[in-house]
Image (tube, rainbow, N blue to C red):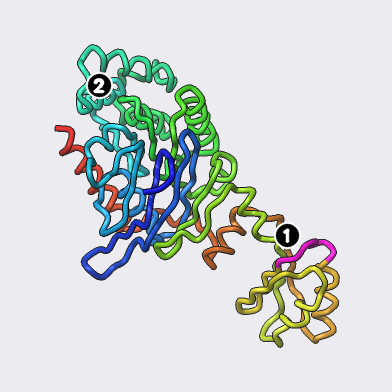
Amino acid sequence: MSGEGAIIAEELVKVYGGKVRAVEGVSFTVRPGEIFGFLGPNGAGKTTTVTMLAAGLRPTSGQAIVDGVEVSRDPEEVKRRIGVIFQEGTADGDLTGRENLEVAAGCYGMSRSDGKERATELIDKMQLTDAADRYAKTYSGGMRRRLELAVGLIHRPRVLFLDEPTLGLDPQGRAGFWEFILSLRKETGMTVFVTTHYLDEADGMCERIAIIDHGRIAATGSPAELKDKLGGDVVTIRTSGPTPDVTPVLQAIRGVSSITKKDDTYRVKCMQGETFVPLAVEAASKAGVGVTGVSVKRPSLDEVFLEFTGREYRGEEGPTETDKAVMMGHIRQNLRGRR
């Protein structure tokens, strides 16, 4: 395997039951110490890829290296070097916050005294001191996520996998969670691999992003690089009822780079949206087509996602049943491996 990175995926393939090809030759490299975003619609292969990287699933073919360890050859060593925070809550509500941490420390083979010391350190860092000896089931959503983050960090991992870490949190809770992540990354140089439904998080927090669709990587780059690939503004034009196709008319306007039509809506990429709009409305009117709505967008990750996958990003969809089954299987496997 060529190249250096905290995480290296090379031609990863995963086939379920000999039929369902969930991942089709995925390759990318995550640099040491960076926050790397992994985005994809439901069923795209996102969860399967993450779970292979975290040694929860064995790939059908291809290779993965995490923190210098080939995952298939030594999955237990990989698990010792990584932290994983799942979208499904994993804290035991019938234990206190402190007990959750001390149990996790024991699972990673830490001595009782070291586990207590590390738990106290993380309780303080996560601002859970006042609630440390309360049952976790009494915690707010934001507190539980901070506790689960602390559990994932108990053994000082070098690579942290975050699977939808702020799903369901309010904006204040999301902002607070990311403050902790940025602080930890600054202090430790930890590599962070994150999947998220919130594109504003990916845009603001991730140095680079990979978009996966139909089991393949559709695009990789920094948020700015991916936006630049759109080539200007995106104008959406809605027309009234069944009308003639005005794509040729719009395409003739100067500065237009591409047009996509779906039903009575045209998505136009052009250099200057404000200049294009009045010309487009006039051209459509001359062609006998009424315009009922127009919007101009500067390039955003929503537009990037639509460009590379052909569909809008729907953050509210949540995980599929396959996603949940894969991740819960990973949890059970990890717990068995630590006993």
Q: Which residue is mark 2?
A: 102
Give the distance between the C-alpha atoms of the residues marked 2 and 1, in whole angstroms. 53 Å
Callout 1 secondary element: loop
Q: Which residue is mark 1?
A: 232
Question: Which of pointers 2 and 1 indicates the residue nearer the eye?
Answer: 1
> Residue 138, percent across and down?
34, 28
Callout 2 secondary element: helix
What range is drawn magenta here?
269-275
Q: Residues within 10 Å of mark 1 (few under 14, many from 20)?
A: many
Where 246 falls versus 110 (above or below)? Answer: below
Q: What is the three-letter code of the residue carrying label 2?
A: Glu
> Residue 121, percent across and down?
37, 15
Q: Residues within 10 Å of mark 2 (few under 14, many from 20)?
A: many
Q: Residue at 29% across / 48% down in the picture?
A: 327
Camera-side residue: 304 or 210?
210
**Would residue 241 be visible to someone looking at this image?**
yes
Camera-side residue: 222 or 177?
222
